[in-house]
Image (cartoon, coloured by chain):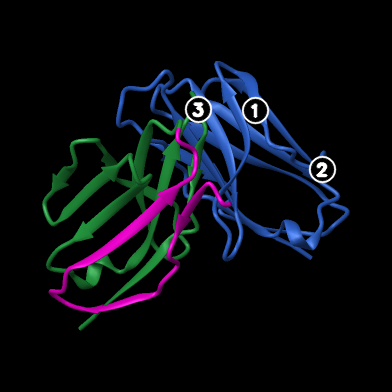
Amino acid sequence: RKEVEQDPGPFNVPEGATVAFNCTYSNSASQSFFWYRQDCRKEPKLLMSVYSSGNEDGRFTAQLNRASQYISLLIRDSKLSDSATYLCAGRAGSYQLTFGKGTKLSVIP
Amino acid sequence: ETGVTQTPRHLVMGMTNKKSLKCEQHLGHNAMYWYKQSAKKPLELMFVYSLEERVENNSVPSRFSPECPNSSHLFLHLHTLQPEDSALYLCASSQDPRPQGSGYTFGSGTRLTVV
């Protein structure tokens, strides 16, 4: 079983739609979780950290469900500029972040 | 300069060549990483350096050789690579032990093509 799994998509949604991504992790010792955004042919950039209590940043909401071992990212009122690949990552030890393959989002006019 | 800088941005090399990738971070971080990103695969951790000492080496072939002369610089020396080594090589840095919620900062990557 892969350590971090994501639906690769693509998710094609119209502007203004709400879209949600889930990511499951297999290592129950994972302590910290993150969502990264990666544009085509660019490096990943940290979008949000994911806290147990859930956290919100504008149109983006991240949640963690430790019992079911998944994290989620909700994007409200999608913009064309949200089109990218979204990577989830988890950390169990001191250093290593383990990434999923990413979920591709295309927001369509 | 700010953030994490990688050079070169693009590299084409033959299988018999020797080349080096360079990474420099200006964030005062104490840990640096090399990741490989291939098409349709997740980011694969290659090497981790913390306080200039290698702390992880994830079964990477010996044709990849890392070097960390100080906490701001990281190199990846390449020799006798194979075409399947063509990928985007990403450097990242972090501050460890890190505060809760602190992730990595990535460089823009070197897109390597082995011919």
Q: Type of residue at label 3?
A: Tyr
Q: Colour of chain A?
A: green
Residue A44: % across, % down: 42, 51
> Where is mark 1, residue-wise?
B56
Secondary structure category for the residue under label 2: loop
- Residue B59 part of the magenta segment: no
Q: Quadrant of residue B11?
A: bottom right
Q: Type of residue at label 2?
A: Arg
Q: Is residue B2 above or below residue B39?
A: above
Q: CA distance from mark 2 to mark 3?
A: 24 Å
- Quick one: A4 or B22, which is closer to the camera? A4
Q: Residue at x 22, y 73 (%)?
A: A80
Q: Residue at x 13, y 57 (%)?
A: A59
Is residue A24 visible to the viewer in this orientation of the structure? Answer: yes
Asked if both marks, 2 and 1, belong to the same chain, the answer given is yes
Residue A95 — which label? 3
User: For the magenta stretch, what is the residue range?
Assistant: A1-28
> Where is mark 2, residue-wise?
B63
Is disc 3 in contact with disc 1, using a CB cutoff of under 8 Å? yes
Quadrant including the C terminus of chain A: bottom left
Q: Is residue B47 left or right of residue A81?
A: right
Q: Nearer the viewer, mark 2 or mark 3?
A: 3
Chain for disc number 1: B
